[in-house]
Amino acid sequence: MKIILETNRLLMREWDASDAVNFYRLNLNPNVIKYTGNSAFASIEEAQEFLENYKDYEINGFGRWAVIHKSTHAFLGWCGLKYDRSLGETDIGFRFFEEHWNKGYATESAKACIHYGFNALKLKTIIGRARVENIASIKVLEKVGLAFVKEFDFDQSNKGVIYKIESDLR
C-alpha cells in the first residue's frame, strides 16, 4: 500500500483493485453521486475493471486517492487531484460515504491535496468544479481556499461553478 499523504486523522493512498467493493458501494448511494454526472457501477467487477484501468498515477504522477481513517482503517471515500490534458487544468475532487459527511474529512483531505499539489508537484493553479446546487461541495472548496471564478454549463441541463486557487510559491 503506497501512502501518499497523512493528516491528523487520515491516510491517503493510491487506489488498487482491492478497493472495488468500496467503490461499488460508494456509487450505489444516489445521494453520493447526485451531483456528479456519474452512475453507479453495474457490479463489483465493473468497479474493479475501472480501478485496474485507472492510469492517472502512471501518466501524471498523481490522481485521486483512497481516504482511510487512521485509527479504524475504514475506507471513507476518495479525494485527490486530476489533470485534464484537454483543458490543461488540475482539479480537486472528493467523494465520501454519506455516513462520513459533515465530519470534516473532505476539508481535511482536500487541504492536504492542495498543499501536496503546490509543494510537491509544483502546480501553479488548482480548480474545483461543482453543480450550483451542490452547496456542501462548494463550501468545502471555499474552506480550503478556492475562490469563485465563474459559472459554466456542467452538462446540458445543469449549471456549474468553477473555483480556483493559485500557488503562492511563484
Image (cartoon, helix red, strand yellow):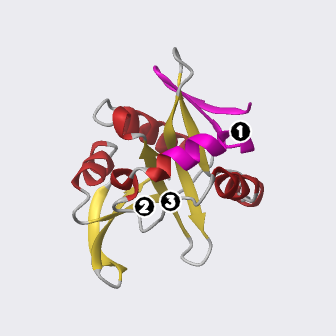
Whole-percent x, y for residue 22 in the image: 57, 40
Question: The disc labelled 2 sits on which kind of residue?
Answer: Ile
Residue 79 showing in the rendered view: no
At x 35%, y 34%, the residue is: 99
98 or 104: nearer the viewer: 98
Reply yes or no: does residue 20 show up in magenta: yes
Which of pointers 1 and 2 lies earlier in the amino acid sequence? 1
Element at badge 2?
Answer: strand
101 or 105: nearer the viewer: 101
Element at badge 3?
Answer: loop
Using residue 83 as the reference point, say whether residue 157 is left or right of it: left
Q: Which mark is residue 61?
A: none
* Residue ID for mark 3: 40
What separation in Å lies between label 1 and label 2 (alpha carbons)? Answer: 29 Å
What separation in Å lies between label 1 and label 3 (alpha carbons)? Answer: 18 Å
Question: The disc labelled 1 sits on which kind of residue?
Answer: Ser
Q: Which residues are magenta?
A: 1-25
> Is disc 3 surrounded by few (<14), some (14 to 19) or many (20+) residues within 10 Å?
some
Q: Which mark is residue 18?
A: 1
Residue farthest along the front direction in this orientation: 43
* Residue ID for mark 2: 127
Q: Quadrant of residue 15?
A: top right
Residue farthest along the bottom direction in this orientation: 156
- Image: 122 above or below 148: above
Question: The disc labelled 3 sits on which kind of residue?
Answer: Ala
